[in-house]
Amino acid sequence: MARDIGVNSLGFAKPPAETRVVVAMSGGVDSSVVAAELATQGYDVIGVTLQLYDHGAALAKKGACCAGRDIHDARRVAETLGFPHYVLDYENTFRDAVIDEFADSYLAGATPVPCIRCNERVKFRDLLETARDLDADCMATGHYIQRKTGLHGPELHMAADPARDQSYFLFSTTAEQLAYLRFPLGHLASKAETRALAARHGLSVADKPDSQDICFVPNGDYAAVIEKLRPGAADPGAIVDMEGRVLGEHRGVIHYTIGQRRGLGIGGLSEPLYVVRLDPEKRQVVVGPKEALSTRTVPVREINWLGDMPFDTREEWPLSVRIRSTRLPAEAIVRPTGPTSAEVTLLTPEEGVSPGQACVFYDTEGTRVLGGGWIWRGY
């Protein structure tokens, strides 16, 4: 008589010891706790850490992930818990798939979000294939997002803790990837719970600070990185108003962002002015009054759709959308203009919308993530 073992915590109808899971380990507390929890539950855990750039040069840098210190911390966690750990050299892949596009997008006056591209093109593509090559049943990460089983298969949902929710950065996860991925921390109510679990497992990273910066941008100094990657990118030019009148000179378009007010060097005017557009071809920074930053219509492309019916089978979708990771989803009408493109109308205009940002779609009545796309030009 066959024994009924039921479904384990990762959704497989077999014992944990017979379930192999690759854990993507950044060296931080989140992914370390995921590995520790699964190893303690008896799963066949393999830890994998990606070396994404020259970590020798990054050892002294704080506030970033995937540097040499983090690789060391991930290895220590694996040694403490007794599961194998591998470091994979993804420097070339990361440069080609993430860093180069970041530099080019920034030079084109956009506001890129490289963490999304890293998840999309490196972690959830190449690393996921490595997990399959290791005969893993699934891959687990420390992201704060939930994977739930719906009527039509796995669904992506916001994290239980709104303050930690990372759905904005994971909108491009495909249905196929979602079937293979697991997010064991998404249900936790707070980061304090994660740190308590780390302490319970005796992990050395229990009190390790969260990473704050983009991993290859020390101290958030985007311009310094762009100048290093693209010499000559900081050529000066004119600051002009919306009618084209020259108001001053800037020190390079890469030093400015949409919505910026401080540091323009054009004082003595009757009203405060903000950066409303960047024109790299003319080397111009265009400024205007605050109301000029207000945007209601947002064109989006490269849409990844996670809904239950095809995206372009309806004329419009009433959804909630998030333009920035720090803002709550707001009501909008999403009108498909093709299988992977749309025009998004914000019911309440937003300020500072910039090409290169993501526009993430949510169910208006729940927590489900329905995908999203990339803003490709501003109005």
Image (cartoon, grey):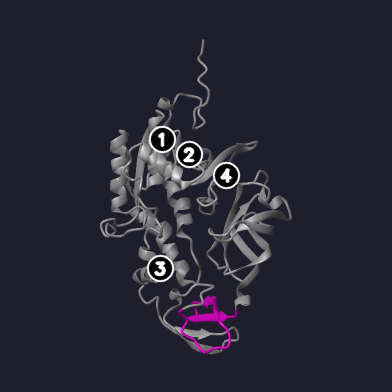
Tag 4: residue type? Leu
* Circle 1: element type: helix
Q: What residue is shown at x 40% (from left), y 53% (from top)?
A: 210
Assess whether mark 1 and mark 2 are in contact (beta carbons under 8 angstroms).
yes
Q: Which residues are magenta?
A: 263-289
Residue 355, located in which quarter of the rendered image? bottom right
Q: Which residue is mark 3?
A: 222
Tag 2: residue type? Pro
Query: Which circle's residue, 4 or 3, is located before the other in the chain?
Result: 4
Question: In the figure, is residue 290 to the left or right of 180?
Answer: right
Please tell me how crowded label 4 is: few (under 14), some (14-19), or many (20+) other residues with Cα within 10 Å.
many
Where residue 219 sits: x, y (%)? 37, 65
Tag 1: residue type? Glu
Task: Please name whichever residue, 291 or 44, is drawn nearer the observer in this view of the structure.
Answer: 291
Query: Which circle's residue, 2 or 1, is located before the other in the chain?
Result: 1
Indicate whether 134 appears above or below 229. Answer: above
* Circle 3: element type: helix
Q: Which residue is mark 1?
A: 37
Task: Please name whichever residue, 327 or 319, is drawn nearer the observer in this view of the structure.
Answer: 327
Assess whether mark 2 and mark 4 are in contact (beta carbons under 8 angstroms).
no
Query: Which circle's residue, 2 or 3, is located before the other in the chain?
Result: 2
Whole-number angstrom distance, CA of label 3 to CA of label 1:
36 Å
Q: Which residue is mark 2?
A: 184
Whole-number angstrom distance, CA of label 2 to CA of label 3:
32 Å
